[in-house]
Image (cartoon, rainbow, N blue to C red):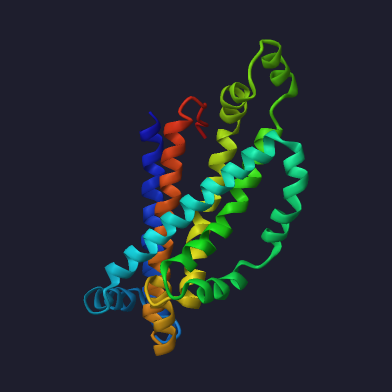
Amino acid sequence: MIATMIQPRVWGSLLLLVALLLLWEYGVQAAGIPKFIIPTVSDIWKEGVRLWFTSKLPFHVGITLWEVILGFAGGALLGATVGYLLGISRTAEALVSPYILALQIAPKVAFAPLFVMWFGFTIYPKVLVAILITFFPVLVNVLAAVRAVEPATIDLARSFKATRAQIFWKIEFPASMPALFSGLRVASTLAVIGVVVGELIGGNQGLGFILTLGDAQGNTAAVFVAIILLTLIGIVAYGAVVIAEGRVLHYQPVRKS
């Protein structure tokens, strides 16, 4: 039943994509826009094929994808851990929250050159920037979810002699799962941004490097190729979180409209 309802929407979305690509291809040509400003879809495709065979494009895609996975996993794990710790301890929240807020306010782009100075042109600066960017949304969602648990529910568990660990694993942790996955959805897309920032500032590999190279050469089509591939990586990361959410939170009711 659900599959039957989804299929028309998928087909409608695909038809819209085809229409937009055709409009892009022939609209640019009809408007007489120079290719160095906005290349046509066919030009971008040709450049993608050229980069695939001459510039090790699959290698650069793999590097960026691996950095996104590491940055997302690290930021999500750190954010969830700190969020749960602050959620179960108001004292810890009062002590640590100002420093976490200051870290969030500080522009993440400013950390990228510093990480490059510390770790060189390696994978670590990109992953660390991604961790910094993905850390906060996961932390905030988890902390808010733990704080939203009804005190009466916790008091009832304590009246049955439940330990602190039992309260966490039986009440607070399950209650926080929807909010956790909401934070993971946001973090999955932010991880791509963090990695690209690191690659643009201090990278000699990855799609950020392709972006920089295309810009230096005035190759607009190459820049579009990198942007499109980065977008696809973000979609894949987001889709993976959605699939995992569906598996873990399968007990939740699904809206039919």
Residue in view at x 38 percent, y 71 percent: 206
Give above or below for 21 relative to 220: above
Residue most extreme to the front: 118
Percent x, y of residue 41 = 35, 73
Task: Using the image as rendered, state which of residue 173 and residue 42 is in the foreground.
Answer: 173
Percent x, y of residue 46 = 27, 77
Whether residue 232 is visible here, answered yes or no, is no
Q: Is residue 256 left or right of residue 173?
A: left
Residue in view at x 72 percent, y 60 percent: 102
Task: Using the image as rendered, state which of residue 43 and residue 117 is in the foreground.
Answer: 117
Percent x, y of residue 68 = 43, 59
Residue most extreme to the left: 53
Whether residue 114 is visible here, answered yes or no, is yes
The number of discs equals: 0
Q: Is residue 89 left or right of residue 4?
A: right
Quadrant in the picture for residue 204:
bottom left
Quadrant in the picture for residue 30:
bottom left
Residue in view at x 78 percent, y 44 percent: 94
Task: Using the image as rendered, state which of residue 27 and residue 93 is in the foreground.
Answer: 93
Q: Quadrant of the N terminus?
A: top left
Percent x, y of residue 91 = 77, 39
Residue in view at x 66 percent, y 34 percent: 146
